[in-house]
Amino acid sequence: MEHHEEQKHHGTHVISYGRYLLIWLGLLSLTGITVALSGLDLGQWIIITAMTIASIKTLLVANIFMHLKFEDRMFRVFVLVAVVTLLIFIVLTFFDYAFR
């Protein structure tokens, strides 16, 4: 019997422990990069860099640990609408803060 990393079994998806470990190590690495960047003087780019790294980490957690990539298309659309709404609030907050 051939072993697949991701298997569909009775409506659920099985992801190997090795893949979870790689994602976890990636998340730890990205966290370490974020902490290391906090000590650098990047000026206004620090916020953009930190938000980009946080977005990548969010995508990894949502897709792998929360199994979002295996959900129905409509559910993913609802999540996308929520994320876009959050992004609008974040952008509006940054504009308010920047132009005070």
Image (cartoon, grey):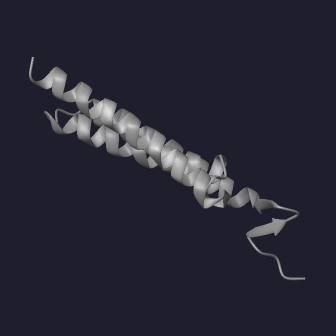
- Quarter in which the N terminus is drawn: bottom right
Q: Is residue 21 visible?
A: yes
Q: Residue furthest bottom?
A: 1
Q: Residue at x 40, y 34 (%)?
A: 86
Residue 36, by quadrant, is top left
Where residue 77 appears, as percent x and y from the top left, is 52, 53
Note whether residue 26 is visible. Answer: no
Q: Position of residue 93 (x, y in %)?
A: 25, 25
Q: Is residue 49 left or right of residue 43?
A: right
Find residue 4 and report its image quarter: bottom right
**Looking at the image, which residue is at 83% across and 61% down?**
11
Which of 11 and 3 lies nearest the eye of the viewer? 11
The answer to whether 3 is drawn above or below residue 73 in the figure is below
The residue at the point 54 percent across, 47 percent down is 78
Residue lying furthest left in this view? Answer: 99
Q: Position of residue 83 (x, y in %)?
A: 44, 41
- Residue at (14%, 34%) from the top-left corner? 44
Front one among 29 and 46: 46
Q: Is residue 30 left or right of residue 52?
A: right
Quadrant position of the C terminus in the picture: top left
* Residue furthest to the top: 100
- Image location (x, y in percent) of residue 15: 74, 60
Q: How many marks?
A: 0
The residue nearer to you, when weighing 8 against 76, is 76
